[in-house]
Image (tube, grey):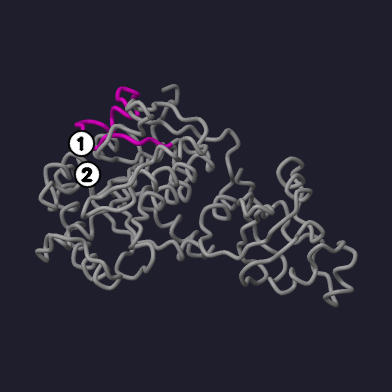
Amino acid sequence: MDIKFNKGDKIVVKVGSSILNSDANALDMKRLEMIVSGVSKLKNMGYEVVIVSSGAIACGMERLGMTNRPISVFALASTAAVGQSVLMSDYEQLFKKYNFLTAQILLTSDGLENRTRYLNARNTIQHLLQMGNIIPIVNENDAVVTDEIKFGDNDKLSAQVAALIDARLLIILSDVDGLYDGNGNVMERIENIDSCISSLAGDTKKKTTVGGMITKIEAAKIAVNAGIPMVIANGLNKDVLEQVVTGETVCSWFLPKKDKISGKKRWIAFSCKNCGKIIVDDGAKQALQDKGKSLLAIGITAVEGIFSFGDLVIISDIHHNEIARGLVNYSSEEVDKIKQTKTDDIEKILGCKSYDEVVHRDNLVILI
């Protein structure tokens, strides 16, 4: 691979439950130690490393003597609460052998939707990395989340963390060598994540994991749009992390988009989960995509959901394909009133006009 890395580059390593768990659905300490050893090597090579680790629910299952993954949200949350302390204790003891400390960071997707919390999380991780001998370990806060716990969102969380800290590389470790094509060969270079690539993603049937390749493809979309290359590699191979950064292993590289998104626009693009939606006509779609224009009321055909001034909204075409996200200058009620009207008529309809644009181009990110 022609991507080169330098000392000081930030690397996010996502460790999946399929790596940490043995066939007996128990935490495999040899595998965990191999991961810890690999991360320590990256640190000693001069890289700054953040781990996004699954495994809390699996550790809880082992500690509680469970053989099947719980079904209800509260049973999952309780199992994760038991397992999280076990998982972090194991990480701490293993990293101590390499003279590194660990720091636990529990995040939720809705927490990252808040701009202040987003920046606080970014600054905290950055400060931990600057301290030199600390390995930040991030996990979804499974004890308090609801829908995320059911879908295994740590793949996408790792991409959000990579974008959050402006990482140079995201490595997702799985129990396969990468994304396979229809003939069973590893696709080593993916430049465009289209429908054909997405169709290659299978699913998982393991008792302690969820998500499979599907969520890894979703993570790749986030990473490459943020200008960050992403790798899917086999975490069961010794020295895989070192071999990824030196280009000496077979794996799948998802190559980043050339135009790097700024920090603020990364937050706009990737931290909004349950947003309202604005539907635009073909003329507005073309103006946004091809001409770099702001979104005006005249091009809006419909409004879905409830939002207020300053909220993140999804912008979709008339076929409900998402084309952009942005910070809106009017509430959903106001947008519904001024849709398909000229800018000069906004004050007449609303009684005042705070902005000419419904979404200004400085607060808008095109996603396709």
Residue located beneath label 2 in the image: 19
**Image check: 363 left or right of 123?**
right
In the displayed structure, 26 sits above or below 251; it is: below
Q: Secondary structure at mark 2?
A: helix
Q: Quadrant of the C terminus?
A: top right
Q: Secondary structure at mark 1?
A: loop
Which is nearer the eye, 76 or 206?
Answer: 206
In the image, what residue type sits under mark 1?
Leu
Q: Residue 94, percent across and down?
A: 15, 47
Mark 1, residues whose alpha carbon is within 10 Å: few (<14), some, or many (≥20)? some
Q: Residue at left 85%, top 69%? A: 346
Residue 367's disc number: none
Q: Residue 32, percent across and down?
A: 17, 45
Mark 2 and mark 1 residues within 8 Å of each other at the beta carbon: yes
**Image check: 318 left or right of 121?**
right
Q: Residue at left 39%, top 44%? A: 216
Which is nearer the eye, 330 or 13?
Answer: 330
What's drawn in magenta, residue-wise?
230-250
Residue located beneath label 1 in the image: 236
In the displayed structure, 57 sits above or below 289; it is: below
